[in-house]
Amino acid sequence: MTYPLWLIPALPLAGFLVNGLVALIAGWQRAAGRTAAWREAHPDAGHGDHGHAPHGGGHGHDDPAGHGHDSHGAHGHGPSVPALPYWQRLFHGVVGVGATGLSCVLALGVVVPFVRESLASENGLPAVVETAYRWMSAGPYVLDIAFRLDALSALMLSFVTFVGTLIHLYSVGYMQDEEGFGRFFAYLNLFMFSMLTLVMANSLPVLFIGWEGVGLCSYLLIGYYYDKDFAAAAGKKAFVTNRVGDFGMVLGIFGIFALFGTADFSFVDMARHGAMNGHAPLSVYAVCLLLFLGACGKSAQVPLYVWLPDAMAGPTPVSALIHAATMVTAGVYLVARCSAVFVLAPDALTVVAWVGAATAIFAASIGLAQNDIKKVLAYSTVSQLGYMFLACGVGAFGAGMFHVFTHAFFKACLFLGSGSVIMAMHHEQDMRAMGGLRPKIPQTYWTMMIATVAIAGIPPLAGFFSKDQILGAAFGAGHPGLFAVGLVTAGMTAFYMFRLARMTFFGTFRGSKEAEGHIHESPATMTVPLWVLAAGALGLGFLGVPEVLGGSNTFMRFLAPSLAASHPHEVSIATEYLLMGMSVAVAAAGILVAWRWYGAAGATPQVPSVQADAFYRGTGPLGPIVANKWNVDEGIEALVLEPFRKIGTALWRGFDALVIDGVINASAFLVELTGDLARFFTTGNVRNYILTLTLGVLTFTLYVWIR
């Protein structure tokens, strides 16, 4: 390695600074030009309206229908403003994609040799740690800004930079009509810097810098259309919800320091050898739960999952970046990184497993009834993240990270594919208004179908290998209940994903004639990333072929040095084949039902499936509840937000207005009263002043004489 590790995250940071500065200057020039043009057009307006020149419609009223739409472009629901000049878009695109792409090249330049040499050695290579500079020193505690390259960080580094670069390239075509093109790429670059800092950090405090950075960037990107109320609210929801998890994360970091006397990742080796402070104020169990609370916030687990579906308010590339390669994987990475600590608290791992299982099946149930194409994928992401935590909870940390890896490719492909569909549909996201798109956008269709088959768990695509290992680990570790939940969730996943495919690409078109006339395939900047991601969804599963299928599970062998050793119960080869067969059979059943119910000729936007509509009506009140996402948002509003509003109102009117304002107002009244009384002694008459002085002297003399 001939270059420092810190250069890898530094390149996206440089892209952020350059794109951000140029976007600010260009924005100032556009605003000045519009103000001058407005003044020239309104010479009699005077100076009273200074600063209120129109902004090209950029701050119009919120469109109530916009909640289900990806609001971008001059023809969408976003700001109706002209696109940037070609040279500006070219500059921002080259800087944004170039910074991330060069970072990817440098990352692969260190990862590929590391992987090759690690697999060639018997126990893997030791971690490479490079210190950039000393951050702080307090007594025995020293904290460095240091970056780490080991098996786990190499894995994250490879797909975060690679998939992130593809998303940047896709964004060039997708966001070309946006006036905020430069601002968007600046945010994307900052997001990449934060995520790379997170995965390469050599200590929890430095990891926390990246952790908070991706939280900030998610707020900025989800609320990209800040002039839309629903987008601004979604950004704030993501930011506030993650603060709950981050509170646990901070306490967990302090707990790690109390247990091991350090917060750099040397505590992982200490945990493996049981070298910790037995008199620490927090137990290992408490520390693990606090760290897991932080993971639940970032990786959207029950009950802190509510921010992620609303993140669809941002542009589709943002959804792909957050849901596939960056923010949502951070929580799983944290648990895997601290796996040696978690195995010291088996009860905490049980909590992790059951929270993951509950999240997986709960989110999958909501995905069954969604009609917004991006919302289906959002709840699918929450469900798949539950799978990953289920794996970690049963001690199969490698299987969980394998699913993180494969999921990054097929889910990014699905989200970017949905963006291509949305562009073809003139920014319509409701699947009930789609249908019959297969011959009109064939590249989008084929890439999305590959990714759909992968996430459904059909062999030999990537999703089959990673998901099957999770189910096998749950069963082998002696958790039949977790296995059953995972198996049912697999069938639900296959159903709602093929429901999406059938409603979107098959049958007859259910939209308007005008919309049908505008359907077109996306440009190469969007379809090339789709094909690359589809290829990953097709073939990357072969990196983790288990021994029972004749493979050596290269993926697990590479990750083993960075993860705590797990000891699952051994199962026979026949049992392993039976478990695989059950998984594929359940997925096939879900696909078959979706295929028969949806995509038939004669479907209408009101009733896209007669069979599904009959089933929905037969469920009684359960169907509407599931369709309304189990009324969770309403429950939070009634049980959390509204009580806090009432408490705040009571404190305002009862304590603030009466007590605090009362004390202040009473003090002011006393000062005013004192002044009113004292002013009677201020007459301006010299004779009165001399008389007062004489009486004072006589009184003082009398006092002294009496004493």
Image (cartoon, grey):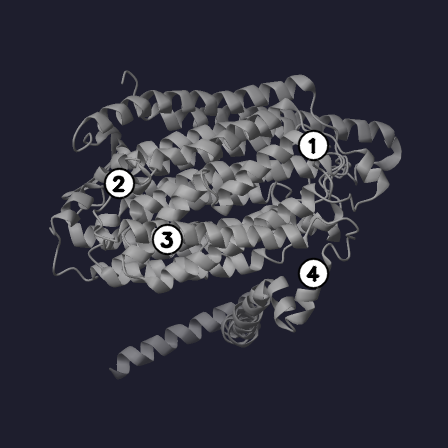
**Circle 2 residue:** 203
Question: Which numbered disc, 2 or 1, marks the residue that appears first in the sequence?
Answer: 2
Residue depth check, mark 2 versus mark 3: number of the one nearer the observer = 3
**Residue placed under numbered mark 4 in the picture:** 611
The image quarter containing residue 73 is top right
* Amino acid beneath label 2: Ser
Q: Position of residue 151 (x, y in %)?
A: 27, 34
Is tag 3's residue or tag 4's residue first in the polypeptide sequence?
Answer: 3
For the residue carrying disc 1, how many other residues have a C-alpha within 10 Å: few (<14), some (14-19), or many (20+)?
A: some
Q: Earlier in the sequence, mark 2 or mark 3?
A: 2
Q: Distance from label 4 to label 1 (Cα)?
A: 28 Å
Residue lying furthest bottom: 706
> Given the image, on which type of amino acid does mark 4 rest?
Gln
**Which residue in the protein does label 1 denote?**
441
Image-based side of 203 in relation to 186, left or right: left
Tag shown at residue 578: 3
Q: Cα distance, mark 4 to mark 2? A: 54 Å
